[in-house]
Amino acid sequence: MTRMTTCMWSNYTAEEQAAFYTSLIPDSRIVRTERTPIDTPSQKAGEVILVEIELAGHRYLLLNGGPMFQHSEAVSFIIHTVDQAQTDRLWDAITADGGAESQCGWCKDKWGVSWQVTPDRLMQLVWDNPDKAAAQRAMQAMMPMRKIDIAAIEAAAAAAVPA
């Protein structure tokens, strides 16, 4: 079977990113760090060129490629959280130290990588909810949020509709 690995371009911050990302996600680790055996247009022999990490069982390469390419919201990482405490912890860590908040649970880390911190409960209330009116209320409550507030979305979903 063919294996696939996602490679993320980095502006010479692969080691720092690897340490940060593996500290965020349980069951994560730095698999290996590789140094370039020769001088390249952007690095000298012996400098770190890539760091392979595993985040919750998925492998990624962080390539120290330089400033030529930037990240965008077109690709993001979704972290499925189990409760508000986990949502808060991850959101606060990702947006700290130069990260940025966005709408509907989206945020960026200080390197410009997009993340969606998505509580499982949000998905249940919006997408897996047999009560379509409650799902609509939950979605409406979520739309203006930055960090997801599970209790507010549950309250909106449970709200009685005026007769």
Image: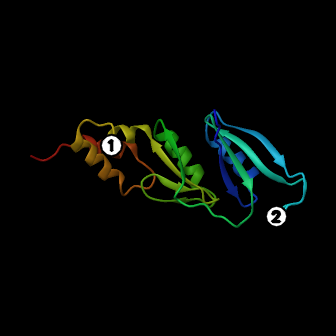
Gap between marks 2 and 1 measured at Cα: 47 Å
Q: Is residue 27 left or right of residue 38?
A: left
Q: Secondary structure at mark 1?
A: helix
Q: Nearer the viewer, mark 2 or mark 1?
A: 2
Q: Quadrant of residue 89?
A: top right
Return the mark for residue 157: none
| Residue furthest out toward the bottom | 68
Comparing 80 with 7, the one in front is 7
- Residue 141: percent from the left, percent from the top? 32, 51
The residue that appears at 71% across and 50% down in the rendered structure is 62
Quadrant occupied by the N terminus: top right
Could you tell me the amino acid type at mark 1?
A: Val
| Image colouring | rainbow
Residue 59 in the image, given as x and y percentages of width and height = 66, 40
Q: Nearer the viewer, residue 37 or 116?
A: 37
Few, some or many residues within 10 Å of mark 1 (<14, 14–19, 20+): many
Q: Is residue 105 left or right of residue 143?
A: right
Which residue does the image show at 75% across and 47% down from the upper left? 51
Of the pair 89 and 57, the residue shown nearer to us: 57
Asked if residue 84 lies left or right of residue 153, the reply is right
Identify the image quadrant of residue 103.
bottom left
Q: Quadrant of residue 129?
A: top left
151 in relation to 109, above or below: above
What residue sits right under mark 2 in the picture? 42
Q: Is residue 54 above or below residue 144?
A: above
Three-letter code for the amino acid on which mark 2 is drawn: Ser
Which label number is shown at residue 126?
1
The local secondary structure at tag 2 comes to: loop
